[in-house]
Image (cartoon, rainbow, N blue to C red):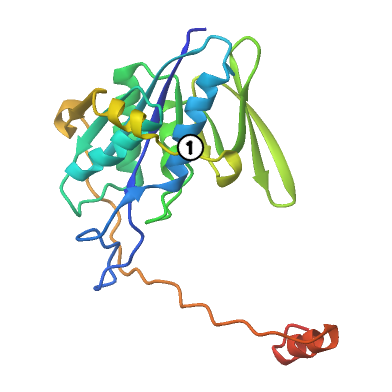
Amino acid sequence: MTALRILVPVKRVKPRVNKTQTGIETAGVKHSMNPFDELSIEESIRIRESKRYPHGVSEIIAFSAGPPKAADILRTAMAMGADRSIHLEIREGEELEPLGVAKVLRAIVEREGVNLVVLGKQSIDDDAGQTGQMLAGLLGWSQATQASKVGFDGQGEKCEVLREIDGGVETVRGSLPMVVTTDLRLNEPRYASLPNIMKAKKKKLDKVTLEELGVGVERRVKTLKVIEPPPRKGGGKVEDVDGMIAKLKELGAL
């Protein structure tokens, strides 16, 4: 086996419903990196730093598809420790469906010789939670979703993932190459230090187009309506256990 070449897709997000209730507001709001993608960057760096994979990590590549300002989160990913970035630039307000993103990622994987993809289980704007699974299907690779721990065997042939399920935990083992999606308990992402932020400005950020990748991303799904959840009602205090039981009976919970 050779050293790992890790691809980490990251997304620029801002979870706020637009006024027409047809999607997520993108204009005039501050965006940040999807939290699950921060976990993915952090885990990739920890795999390298801890020498968890017996043959080492040769390169960590961050990728994002988004408007010009998406370059900001790629710089953040490089400040955290990614070696270089690739940016597929699309127009502001234009969104790719999960299948379209998976097709783009397949092209990047094949172009860059990647053998491990680590990505968030979902983005916090559309909450689709589909891209990782679709990518594994397109590539014909092993997959493990919602990882809370990632490890490798001594020969560097298998990847072992611990994932939380209803009622406990489950261990999934698959052969490399592999797609792993990350969950919240995996790690605590580091803050990018000022020196690393300055160093990231000198790291390579390549731009690609859909034409160069030879990928079609025509939309297949139309979003009819998006609404925010209703605001939570304030809680109330009870004096003792009897008061709590009475309140629960009042609410029909008992």
Name the secondary structure under disc 1.
loop
User: Looking at the image, which is closer to me, 148 or 128?
Assistant: 148
Q: Is residue 247 left or right of residue 184?
A: right
Name the residue tied to disc 1: 190
Question: Does residue 180 show up?
Answer: yes
Q: What amino acid does circle 1 point to?
A: Arg
Q: 133 left or right of 161?
A: left
| Image point (60%, 44%), residue name | 185
Between 9 and 242, the one lying in front of the other is 242
Q: Residue at x 32, y 70 (%)?
A: 225
Image quadrant where one finds the C terminus: bottom right
Does residue 219 sit above or below 194 in this rendering? below
Query: In x, y percent, where is residue 189?
Result: 50, 39
At a point 41% along the width and 50% down the height, the residue shown is 123
Q: Quadrant of residue 11?
A: top left
Q: Position of residue 196 (x, y in %)?
A: 35, 29
